[in-house]
């Protein structure tokens, strides 16, 4: 469902028996704090069934977009559609590889042409650039803070390599 607020359509969710703030936030891939603040919730420990919550609009990070899960979807199909490994898609969304996903759940997925790399112990900026076939500027456009800790997600857009290195990029 949705509601019009200030001329803008906002998604809504009707609380069901057994729902809690954490599961609703996870379903929409938003923070618990943002959901509480958007709805001015005072008692977050009990949500009255039938209560209509406004889902705050989450801006996807540069190079990513949101995908809303449809009935019958699974992580393998979504990963294939967005040219990302199931492992990386799972990690990107804080999910286990075999975790159940459900209709209307929002997942963060890379935009076309954007790839992801999960850092490993011992990686440096230069080894990442070499592995990915990209450059320093491109890495920092999508990743303003790189800590080089194992399992940090790095987004990048692979640059086009020249067909003939002698002729350069405009061959």
Image: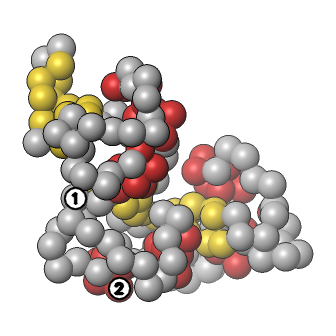
Residue under pointer 1: 104
Residue 134 % position (x, y):
63, 66
Residue 56 % position (x, y):
34, 34
Q: Is residue 30 visible?
A: no
Q: Is residue 88 visible?
A: yes
Query: Alpha-carbon neighbours of circle 2 within 10 Å: few (<14), some, or many (≥20)?
Result: some
Task: Identify the element where label 2 is drawn.
Answer: helix
- Residue 76 tag number: 2
Q: CA distance from mark 2 to mark 1?
A: 17 Å
Picture quarter containing residue 30?
Answer: top left
Q: Residue furthest right?
A: 122
Q: Is residue 170 left or right of residue 77?
A: right
User: Which of these two is toward me, 78 or 125?
Assistant: 78
Q: Nearer the viewer, mark 2 or mark 1?
A: 1
Q: Residue at x 72, y 56 (%)?
A: 136
Q: Residue at x 33, y 39 (%)?
A: 47
- Count the labels in the image: 2
Q: Residue furthest top?
A: 6
- Residue 64 tag number: none
Q: Residue at x 66, y 72 (%)?
A: 118
Rendered view: 60 above or below 8: below
User: Which of these two is toward me, 168 or 98?
Assistant: 98
Colour mode of the rendering: secondary structure
Residue 151 % position (x, y):
71, 70
Query: Alpha-carbon neighbours of circle 1 within 10 Å: few (<14), some, or many (≥20)?
Result: few
Cβ–Cβ under 8 Å for marks 2 and 1: no
Q: Is residue 147 left or right of residue 1?
A: right
User: Which of these two is toward me, 42 or 110?
Assistant: 42
Picture quarter containing residue 14?
Answer: top left
Q: Residue at x 44, y 35 (%)?
A: 44
Task: Identify the element where label 1 is drawn.
Answer: loop
């Amino acid at each position: 469902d949705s509601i019009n607020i200030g001329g803008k359509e906002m998604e809504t969710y009707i609380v069901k028996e057994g729902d809690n703030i954490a599961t609703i936030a996870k379903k929409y891939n938003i923070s618990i704090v943002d959901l509480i603040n958007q709805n001015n919730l005072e008692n977050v420990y009990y949500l009255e069934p039938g209560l209509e919550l406004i889902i705050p609009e989450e801006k996807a990070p540069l190079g990513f977009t949101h995908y809303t899960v449809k009935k019958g979807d699974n992580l393998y199909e979504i990963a294939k559609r967005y040219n990302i490994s199931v492992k990386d898609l799972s990690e990107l969304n804080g999910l286990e590889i075999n975790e159940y996903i459900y209709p209307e759940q929002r997942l963060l997925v890379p935009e076309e042409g954007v790839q992801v790399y999960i850092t490993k112990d011992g990686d440096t900026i230069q080894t990442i650039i070499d592995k990915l076939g990209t450059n320093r500027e491109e890495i920092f456009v999508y990743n303003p803070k790189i800590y080089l800790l194992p399992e940090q997600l790095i987004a990048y857009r692979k640059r086009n390599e020249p067909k003939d290195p002698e002729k350069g990029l405009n061959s």
